[in-house]
Image: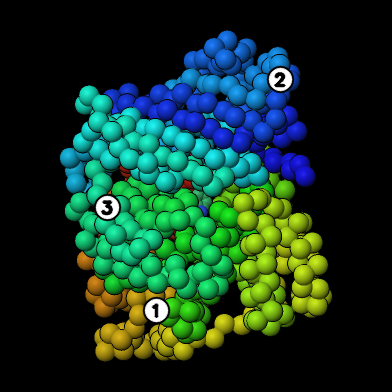
Amino acid sequence: MSVEDPHSFSDFTQGLIQHINFEIEVNFVSHTLGILANYHLDRPVTGSFFLDTRDLQIKRISQDGKNVEWELDMEDDILGQRLHLHELDQVSEFSIQLKTSPGASALQWLQPTQTAGGLHPFLYSQCQMLHARSIFPCQDSPSVRFTYNATIKAPEALKAVMAAESMGDMREGGSTVSSFHMPQPIPSYLFALAIGELVFQEVGPRTGIYAEPSIIDAAVWEFEENEEKLIQAEKLLGPYLWDRYDLLIMPPAFPPGGMENPRLTFLHPSIIVGDRSATYVVTHELAHAWTGNLVTNATWEDFWLNEGWTTYAELRITELLEGKDVEQLIWHLKRTAMHDAMANFGYESRFTCLSYSQEGVDPDIVFSSIPYAKGAAFLVCLEEAAGRDVFDAFIKHYIETYQFTSITTDEFIAFLLENLPEAAERVDIEEWVHHPGFPESAPQLSSKLYDEVESAISAFTKGILPEKKTVKNWRALQVIQFCLDLQNQEVTIADCKYFEDLFGIDDSASAGLRRAFYLFAIPAGYEDIRPGIERYVEQVGRSFFLMSLYRCMVKVDWTREFARSLFEENRHRHHPITVKSNDAILTEAGL
Ligand code: BES
Ligand code: ZN
């Protein structure tokens, strides 16, 4: 089976990368990685071989010590540059010596002041969507999988980690050389490394946490339940095939809330709230170990197979751990985010479909909550049509059938029709997958926890503000949902002041709560929050949170005025991906 991937220059019929040996040397002065990469292909290649790259400085390509002719012969804003190896003669192994660019889109080089400890620099990678190609030449498509070994040479005061098995560290002069081994084949977007002042602590036999020393204790408390989470996840999804499940707590500039790098989820520090209210992000990244990392979307056009399935699994695990009512409350939050995204694109936009052509489309720019919540709702529909027991058997069969492979939406539908024919008959698959908007027939949500939020909103519309004693018993996520629902209400500046005090916004450790507050307080014209917004943008680098904030700011006069300058002041703090997506919002708004 050969996949067409609109986001790769590769030609998969030429041969496939099967294994890579990396020797990586980190240079914190020039902000570059020096890399020697040795490639093994799945067959001998004769003639041309194409690889994806972005801003790489290629020094030499060789085979058995002989130079290989190459050129960068195609260039595209979204895809980067095509590396063309010429006139290969039965070649199944070659080496590339290269240097990354200081602006490599996958890498962020942090100053000591941008870390928790403040004393040492920090480097990390974020390869999803199309950024692995800015570290090493590859067939940068989720349809291609390879194993790898790697060594990382870094200053000895720092610790290097990878989303791979650690094979130990060795001193070499003033440096440490750390070795890694990734025996399970992964797609390029799951390649990941980080280097900083890191310590490790176990929370269970298969689970542990890497973090900077000053935050390790808080992290251990917040994520103490990870081993139990893993056990519950296995009940739903089958055996965990990646050996360990560790977390790496990132510096605040890390763009996503969490990234499912295999064996080692990279987690934004704002997930440590102090009350475990954001740990559903860990549940989500853990679920990716099956849906995404074992069964992978073949291209980013099939992104909903990764995120819709993972959102579905996340919620099922939450139900096992915390009950139906909490699960349904989290569903409300996800639906709210999805509707916001649909309103942004327009309900008729093709970007609201689960599957559509992404030819000429940058997947980072069209990223939204839609494949998550619409995809998961589609799966709930199928579950309801099949019955839970039948669907649970289907889930395990699906994962077992496709583990360590990548599949397209069409392949999934064919599998569905074959294995759940009766349920598939009763669900309008065509509408769910190929039509824009959110189907009327979507499952209804029902949660007592949400009902409390809803009645507080309905009281608010009659001029009655919620009292402290009511809100005191609310869960953190109820407060967030309440604030998000206030976006659709007439809110006065006096109301804003009341809620700011009621919910303790100023000293809240919850980035999610502060965001939800700003999203209604900005349109309400509450100008006193300007310093708070400025601090927020400086302290919370989460790209998806910032995107929603900037989208809101550009629509309202008083914030529109300073949105661009605020962004420019913080540009140097952000990851290149965060810069790109947020810059696009401002530019599109004419700023
Ligand atoms: N894989 C995504 C993060 C991602 C998406 C990185 C697109 C780069 C491009 C991850 O699994 C994710 O979805 N994280 C969410 C949290 C989740 C609970 C919805 C996030 O970062 O907010
Ligand atoms: Zn995800």
Dividing the picture into quadrants, the one containing residue 274 is bottom left
Q: Crowding near pointer 3: few (<14 within 10 Å), some, many (20+)?
A: some
Dividing the picture into quadrants, the one containing residue 339 is bottom right
Q: Please tell me which of labels 3 and 2 falls first in the chain.
A: 2
Find numbered disc 3 in the image and state the secondary structure of the residue it sits on: strand
**Three-letter amino acid code of the residue under disc 1:** Gln
Image spot of residue 12 (x, y percent): 71, 35
- Marks 2/1: CA–CA distance: 62 Å
User: In the image, 457: left or right of 30?
Assistant: right
Q: Crowding near pointer 1: few (<14 within 10 Å), some, many (20+)?
A: many
Image spot of residue 516 (x, y percent): 39, 67
- Marks 1/3: CA–CA distance: 33 Å
What is the residue that sits farthest to the top in this orientation?
A: 66
Q: Please tell me which of labels 2 and 1 falls first in the chain.
A: 2
- Residue depicted at 67% across the width and 33% down the height: 42
In-front residue for pair 103/554: 103
**Three-letter amino acid code of the residue under disc 2:** Gln
- Residue depicted at 76% across the width and 56% down the height: 411
Image spot of residue 215 (x, y percent): 22, 56
Residue 200 disc label: 3
Point out the frontmost of discs 2 and 1: 2
Dividing the picture into quadrants, the one containing residue 112 is top left
- Residue depicted at 23% across the width and 63% down the height: 218
Q: Which residue is mark 1?
A: 478
Q: Crowding near pointer 2: few (<14 within 10 Å), some, many (20+)?
A: few
Q: Which residue is mark 2?
A: 90
Dot 2 and dot 1 residues touching (CB under 8 Å) = no
Would you place residue 383 above or below residue 195 in this image?
Answer: below
